[in-house]
Image (cartoon, rainbow, N blue to C red):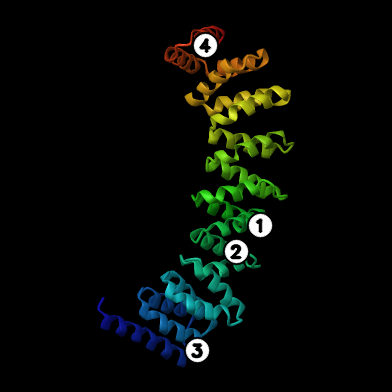
Amino acid sequence: MAQKNIEQEISAILEEINKKLENNELTFKLQRELAEKLGSLKTWQIIEPMENLLKNPKVPEFMKIQIIEQLGKYKEPRVIRVLFDIYNSGNEKLKNEVIKSCSYIKNQKVVPILLEGLNNKDKWVKVFSIRGLQKNYSKKIAPKLIEMLADSDEFIRKEALSSLQKINEDNIIPALIEGLNYPNRYAKLACVSLLGNKKAKEAVPYLIDLLNTNDKRLFILATRALCEIKDVNSIPKLILLGLNNQELKEIIINLIYNMGTEEIIFSLLELYIEIKKIEVRQYIEEILKRFRNKAEDVILEYKNSINDEEKKKILENLFQII
């Protein structure tokens, strides 16, 4: 659209707004429609007219809220100054709307306002703040989002969990591991789930430690996370845990079986050859029996790939056992 046409359209909208103001004909519906009409132009030229409307004491508060929303949806960093001015004006309703509006903008300048929004009493202000912080994610934001997993409102907790799931940055993993120490159960459960979802191998030792918990839900999520991660380096520690804790013995067998990869079976075979303790080998045999044909195929493949006769004999005997 040519610049002249844009200017004419903006002028026509402003003229209609002023006329309706003078005649006291600005219904709620019309306020929304005119604000949306102005916002739909998606050009930097709407910023100054919108700012003037926001400063005009005759413009109803409801329309100002609609204008603030449209400024945010324009998503241009150049609207931030206008939004900040309104935020600092002292009007609580407009201030809350600015926080929501900032959630649409991807720019680090809006982060301080969004962080403040996490402490807002309004549920939806919190929701928009979480969404905006996910969009503007940085390492310093992670602990704040994780704190929201402990919110008393289930909807807020789910929103925080959803946002954290969408963040693919590696630097979020240490914050999630730290979250395992949170006293709040909701936060701890969510961090376990997220670590599994993100296949965070560095979290494996901490997840294995959680298998000693008395919290059944936490235990289930920790085992599920370990299954998702499928870290071969966790096998020795898991086997040791199963041998030392009779209550966990069968659970550990199922856990390792559910990891289900050939790499896991190879790891079991290497451990079987390396460790000569009878109880360890018997435990590994129980696990390999769960894999059945899959384990047999891997044993044969492994046996054919090595020249060490002693190891071959061990594998042949193992093949007969399972």
Q: Residues within 10 Å of mark 1 (few under 14, many from 20)?
A: few
Residue at (70%, 36%) from the top-left corner?
216
Q: Nearer the viewer, mark 1 or mark 4?
A: 4
Residue 126, numbered label:
2
Do we see residue 23 in this rendering?
no
The CA distance from mark 3 to mark 2 is 28 Å
Q: Quadrant of residue 141?
A: bottom right
Taking the image as shown, residue 5 lies to the left or right of residue 164, namely left
Q: Which residue is mark 3?
A: 56
Name the amino acid type tagged 1: Asp
1 or 2: tag closer to the N-terminus: 2
- Is 77 rendered above or below residue 48? above
Which residue corresponds to mark 1? 153
Q: Dot 2 surroundings within 10 Å: few (below 14), some, or many (20 or more)?
A: many
Q: Nearer the viewer, residue 109 or 56?
A: 109
Quadrant containing the C terminus in the rendered view: top right
Going from N to C along the chain, the mark reached first, 4 or 3, is: 3
Q: Assign a secondary structure to mark 4.
A: helix
> Which residue was labeled with disc 4?
311
Task: Mark yes or no: residue 269 visible.
Answer: yes
Q: Is mark 1 in CB contact (under 8 Å) with mark 2?
A: yes
Query: In which quadrant is the N terminus drawn?
Result: bottom left
Question: Which residue sits furthest front?
Answer: 308
